[in-house]
């Protein structure tokens, strides 16, 4: 899947990332990640790699479910 679109936001104690990816043969998927720390700002250089790993894992899981014919299934 290729990253075709992304949206990010940073505020005091908040970091959000959202990506849209399209498969070559199937549907499109959107993954959004939100992090919040009410006591201090979030450093994107520290939190970013963890959030990107979560996004990559979510896209990988979605693609596997599609390949297995489980997309849209609760199983």
Image (tube, rainbow, N blue to C red):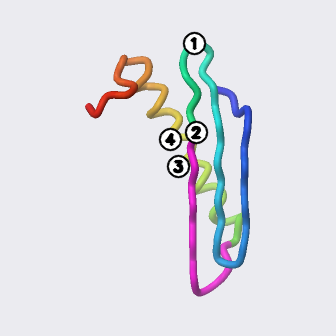
User: In the rendered structure, are the residues bearing label 4 and label 2 in contact, judged by CB atoms less than 8 Å apart?
Assistant: no
Q: Residue 35 magenta-drawn?
A: yes
For image coordinates 71% across by 65% down, the residue present is 44
Q: Report which residue position mark 2 lands on.
A: 30
Pinpoint residue 51: horizontal percent, then vertical percent.
59, 55
User: In the rendered structure, are the residues bearing label 3 and label 1 in contact, judged by CB atoms less than 8 Å apart?
Assistant: no
SS class of the residue under badge 1? loop
Q: Looking at the image, how many numbered discs can be counted on the residues? A: 4
SS class of the residue under badge 4? helix
For image coordinates 26% across by 31% down, the residue present is 75
N-term mark: 4 or 2: 2
Q: In 3D space, how far apart are the residues under numbered discs 3 and 2 (Cα atoms)? A: 13 Å
Q: Nearer the viewer, mark 3 or mark 2?
A: 2
Q: Report which residue position mark 4 lands on.
A: 57
State the quadrant of the N terminus: top right
Residue 49 lies in what quarter of the image?
bottom right
User: In the rendered structure, are the residues bearing label 4 and label 3 in contact, judged by CB atoms less than 8 Å apart?
Assistant: yes
Q: In 3D space, how far apart are the residues under numbered discs 4 and 2 (Cα atoms)? A: 12 Å
Q: Find the magenta span and give its range.
A: 31-42
Q: In 3D space, how far apart are the residues under numbered discs 4 and 3 (Cα atoms)? A: 5 Å
SS class of the residue under badge 3? helix
Residue 65 lies in what quarter of the image?
top left
N-term mark: 3 or 1: 1
Q: Report which residue position mark 3 lands on.
A: 54
N-term mark: 2 or 1: 1
Q: Report which residue position mark 1 lands on.
A: 25
For image coordinates 49% across by 41% down, the residue present is 58
For residue 38, above or below residue 6 = below
- Relative side of 10 to 16, left or right: right
Q: Nearer the viewer, mark 3 or mark 1?
A: 1
């Amino acid at each position: 899947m290729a990253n075709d679109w992304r949206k990010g936001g940073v505020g005091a104690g908040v970091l959000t990332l959202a990506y849209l990816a399209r498969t070559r043969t199937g549907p499109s998927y959107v993954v959004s990640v939100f992090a919040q720390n009410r006591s201090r700002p979030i450093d994107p250089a520290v939190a970013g790699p963890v959030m990107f790993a979560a996004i990559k894992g979510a896209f990988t899981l979605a693609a596997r479910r599609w390949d297995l014919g489980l997309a849209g299934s609760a199983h």
